[in-house]
Amino acid sequence: MSLSSATLAPLREDLRLHEAAPDKDGAPAWSIQDPVTNRFFRIGWLEFECLLRWPGQPSQMAEDIGSTTPLAPEPEQIEAFAHFLERHRLLRPTLQGVDRLATQGAETGWQHWRWWLHHYLFIRIPLVRPERWLTSVLPLVRPLLSPTGLALILSGCVMGMVLVARQWDSFTHGVVESFTLAGLSGFLLALVISKIGHELGHALVATHFGVRVSHMGMAFVVLWPMLYTDTSEAWKLRSHRQRLAVSAAGMTVEMALAGLATLAWALLTDGPLRQAMLYLATTGWVLSLALNASPFMRFDGYFILSDILDFPNLHDRSAALARTWLRRTLLGWSEPDPEPLSPTWRRALIAFALATWIYRAVIFLAIAIAVYLLFFKVLGLFLFGVEVVWFILRPLWSEFSVWRARASETGKRRRYWSRFLALLLLILFIIPWPFDVDGPGVARTQRQQNIFAPFPARVAALHPPGQVKTGSVLVFFEAPDLEARGLRTFATIEALNQRLTGLAVEDSGMDLRRATSERLNEQLAETQALRDEGGRLQVSAEFEGVWLDVDPSLAPGSWVDNKTQIGILVDPRQWIVDAYIEQRQIDRLQVGASARFRADRHWRSVAAKVIDIDTTRNIQLADAMLDARHGGSIATQSGERPEQPVETLYRVRLALAEPLTERHETRGRVRIEGQNQSMAWELLKRIAAVVIRESGF
């Protein structure tokens, strides 16, 4: 017996049908509510007419609908609707369905490994049923929902932002100084307060429009706790503007709290209360937008966009449209669109679906890495594999399975071209290609002379900044202690000479003359040492260049120690760059390779050439300006002195083909011509490196 002539299974008696807002084209719509799961399924006119005649035989139902309404359905459409109802368990279970439910019931829910495999990423735990409490509290907050209340809140937020803009440096400085253990605790508490307000906003606005809030609770996203509110019954609202108000209420409350906290911070004086307002303002402005505004995940941003467009099931419908477009474009199938839409809507939804797929692939891969790092290694590797396979590879395999099952629908010419393109991509992936090697670097003059005092001394004369010639005296120091020691030594020498003259006429003074002579030699050696020390007090230019960075506070008579730099002499005609390259890239470089250097503050790059490559790793980061803690791009070990890079880096020295316009050390990036590299071989090496590194359990 065919399905068209078989009587369909009856509907469940507990289902509820609600009239919904009409579609954009004016067609009537309804919502089927499943009270067990509290889920809503939007249906159109044809499905509604089917429900009026349910149960029955699809062929008879199609004939009756065609004779009594303007619709002209086919039995296959009714069969597809029956499959939809069965898939979502809206029909009374058949014998096979009862067996399937019994099998699922035999699995002990959360005690079964399969439940954790499917639910560890997102677990919801209902905690309270707030309907009665929300009804009693709503009259107290309803004035805030009035136009006057909203206008006052908006005015306060705008005033707060204006006042903070006038003291922006103080605000950002306070945020940076808050990154301590106590500060992070304050941010966490402010986040809890902000998220509680977020969920109460959803619940109160939903109650205001007569929507029942069945429960509120806590959800765990990759074991990270988050609050949630069940407002699924908002689909009963016929006005998409009311649904939009419910969806946007959470973010609106967070933004209002952040704006008013910003105003309070600007008006308060320094103290604990002002710091608390800083925490609340920062978490509201930054974290709320970062977590909830994205329309590519099923958070507030998605529901807000769906309600603004009045386009329910935006993700599912756009994904179905994009899959159809891919099949027509790549495989040449004559597959109709899932629903009729204008060309503008069609292109926009396809672009949205493609962006959603890319965004979710990145997010799920990041979650997989976070899961791996969160758990111990064996479990982390297993959950990493589950994330990648279940959320990234499984959807791809599902679509490729459809392509393979319907391969006969693809034309022979299209199949040849697709195989040719696949082979071409494989070849391009295997053959070596020239790829540049990129890394951070610091440019400095090749010749430079840093001037320090040889020991604590007093400045006697200082050359002004500017151009100097070779041999010019840059700074002359005075050392009164050295002069005093010299005078004492000179006096001692004079006394010893007179002593020796007196002993020369005495016949019995041979031993005494020898001792006096040895002491005189010691004093003469001391005099030479003092003369050498005195020579260090005059510092001259070793080459012709520019005398820079002279402390303007230094003047004749100023005392300096031997750790204070007086200035620096540079030769601006020749420049070198010290770049730091990752270990996996260093074997692709060779001396003489061409390169380019671009300073951070400029778009123009300068040609360079590799002149030296270190053969051992760089244990100490010699250039502090490249440290990530000082605005650079190289991460270093926390608390280590001197700074040690986290990654294995090698120093590569380059000579610039022309001088830079700057006179000081300049941070930037280098691009060095590397030897040809196969993308496939590089991928295999990276995978092997990760496996070897992570295989030590």
Image (cartoon, rainbow, N blue to C red):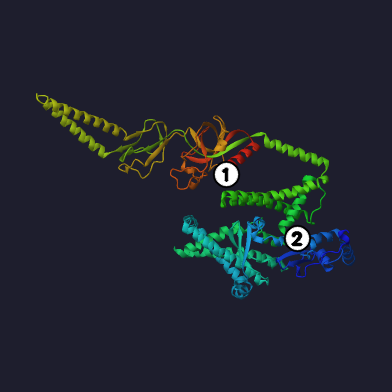
Measured Cα–Cα span from mark 1 to mark 2: 41 Å
Where 492 sits versus 635, above or below? above
Q: What residue is shown at x 52% (from left), y 58% (from top)?
A: 165
* Quadrant in which residue 19 is drawn: bottom right
Would residue 469 be found to the left or right of residue 77 on screen? left
The disc, 1 or 2, on the residue closer to the chain's N-terminal end is 2
Residue situated in front as seen by the camera: 545 or 356: 356
Residue underneath mark 2: 100
User: Few, some or many C-alpha atoms within 10 Å of disc 2 (few <14, some 14-19, many ≥20)?
Assistant: few
Q: Are marks 1 and 2 in contact (CB under 8 Å)?
A: no
Res 476 seen here? yes
Report the disc number at residue 694: 1
Horizontal and vertical percent position of residue 31: 75, 66
Q: Which amino acid type is shown beneath numbered disc 1?
A: Glu
User: Few, some or many C-alpha atoms within 10 Å of disc 1 (few <14, some 14-19, many ≥20)?
Assistant: few
Q: Which amino acid type is shown beneath numbered disc 2?
A: Arg
Residue situated in front as seen by the camera: 502 or 112: 112
Q: Secondary structure at mark 2?
A: helix
Horizontal and vertical percent position of residue 321: 76, 53
Horizontal and vertical percent position of residue 359: 65, 51
Report the disc number at residue 475: none
Residue situated in front as seen by the camera: 206 or 168: 206
Horizontal and vertical percent position of residue 18: 75, 69
User: Which residue is farthest front?
Assistant: 106
Please name which of the two marks, 1 or 2, marks the residue nearer to the observer: 2
Where 608 sits versus 239, above or below? above
Where 574 sits versus 133, above or below? above
